[in-house]
Each structure stands twice: as structure tokens, then as C-alpha cells.
Amino acid sequence: SQQGEEDPQALSIQEGENATMNCSYKTSINNLQWYRQNSGRGLVHLILIRSNEREKHSGRLRVTLDTSKKSSSLLITASRAADTASYFCATDAATDKLIFGTGTRLQVFP
Amino acid sequence: GAVVSQHPSRVICKSGTSVKIECRSLDFQATTMFWYRQFPKQSLMLMATSNEGSKATYEQGVEKDKFLINHASLTLSTLTVTSAHPEDSSFYICSATDASTGETQYFGPGTRLLVL
């Protein structure tokens, strides 16, 4: 399977703490994207990082990409209860098709 | 921002019937739409890529006669689950790529299908 792996599978933290999720993938990529999914809902696009970029920020989100290790991380700073969701990385290998990682279920307790 | 809608949001049907799910890009043109399937607490698995005006491209292991896809216009793609069985029960999500920007896929809210 070409599916990427994410770890941890599940993460529970208190409000105000930082949450870090990691994603590893298998093939060369054009870009890597992070999505968020609330339970039973569709996906919300969070951030896209291109293969020639190493770090990107968007509000409380920070994404890093290490193409030599085929890995990426998503950091959510000062987490809130509303950040509770599943987070997926997805890679685009120049075919327009996205290959999704296994996902991390984040629970933020108030 | 780009909005993708799906209809219906939930559907319950009897085994053997066919179910049609619509995916619409509301404020942009989508030359390409994608259909995914998601089982509970699992990731999204791509089923097929739908291109406007041409036949869909199915992923390995997805039966094209079972999951009929029609991309009739730049804003509408439909997925029909034919002769549905209980094992087809799942969450079906579509996405669309904005033809003018190309990179980001915008996802619909999903359709939960339950086959009894």
C-alpha cells in the first residue's frame, strides 16, 4: 500500500498545550497537505507545503517537511477544545491524486 | 472560499437497490472530482477520479460496474452505488480541484450510506 503512516494514532492533551502529529510517506511528492476532519464530517484543508519548502505557518499551525526522510509534522500551538478532530496528511505525487495517511485522532480536554 | 456540497447527507436503503450521490462545486469549476470511501475510524481511500466529459478512472480493486460515476458538467459529478449490499455501507466523500488553481482539493461534507 502507498498509504502514509501517521503517529501517534491518538493523542489526548489539555487545553493550552501543544499537539504534534507526524506523517511519513513512501514516494516522491509534489506537495503535502494537512486536513482536519470533525467526527462524521467532510475534510477541511489546513495547509499545503510544497516539496521545496521546509516549514510553513498558518495561525497556530506550523508544518515542517523533510523530503530526505519522507516525513512531515503538524504542530498546533496553544490547543483549544475546538481543535478536537482527526488530522490527516495527504501527499500529491504529481498525479493529482491524494494519498492519505492513517490519521491522528486528537482530543483536547478543557 | 471554494465550497463543495454533497446530496444526500445520509441515506438508508434496502439491499439490492441503487443509490445516487451528487457532488457539486458551488462557486468554482472543477474539471476533476474525486470519490473517496471512509470506514469508521479509518482513513480515506480513493475510489475513482472523475473527469468532466470522459470516463472515470477507477483505483485498483474498485468495481466500475458497481460504482458508476458520471461527471456531466464542470460543477457536478454523481456516484451511483448499484445493487447495494450491507458491506457497501460507508461514508462516501467527494472532492474537487479548482480548475483555475489546481493544487488544493476541496472536500464535500460526505454522505453516510447505510444498506439494510
Image: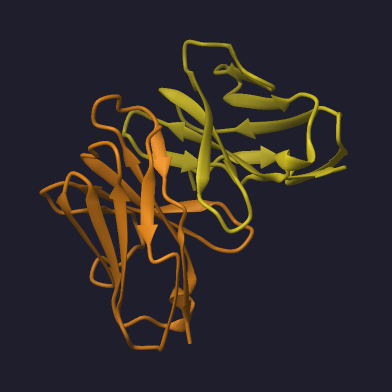
Chain colours: A yellow, B orange
* Residue A92 percent coordinates (x, y): 41, 31
Lateral position of residue B61 relative to residue A48, left or right: left
Q: Is residue A104 above or below residue B68?
A: above
Q: Nearer the viewer, residue A8 or B70?
A: B70
Disc tally is 0
Q: Nearer the viewer, residue B6 or A76?
A: B6
Q: Is residue B78 above or below residue B19?
A: above
Lateral position of residue B107 relative to residue B62, left or right: right
Q: Which image quadrant for residue A25? A: top right
Q: Residue at x 47, y 17 (%)?
A: A51
Q: Nearer the viewer, residue A14 or B2?
A: B2
Quadrant occupied by the C terminus of chain A: top right
Q: Which image quadrant for residue A59? A: top right
* Residue B93 percent coordinates (x, y): 43, 55
Q: Is residue B75 above or below residue B28?
A: below
Q: Residue at x 40, y 88 (%)?
A: B15
Q: Is residue A28 above or below residue B113?
A: above
Lateral position of residue A29 relative to residue A95, left or right: right
Lateral position of residue A64 relative to residue A84, left or right: left
Q: Nearer the viewer, residue B10 or B113?
A: B10
* Residue A63 percent coordinates (x, y): 62, 21
Residue lying furthest left: B53
* Residue B40 percent coordinates (x, y): 60, 63
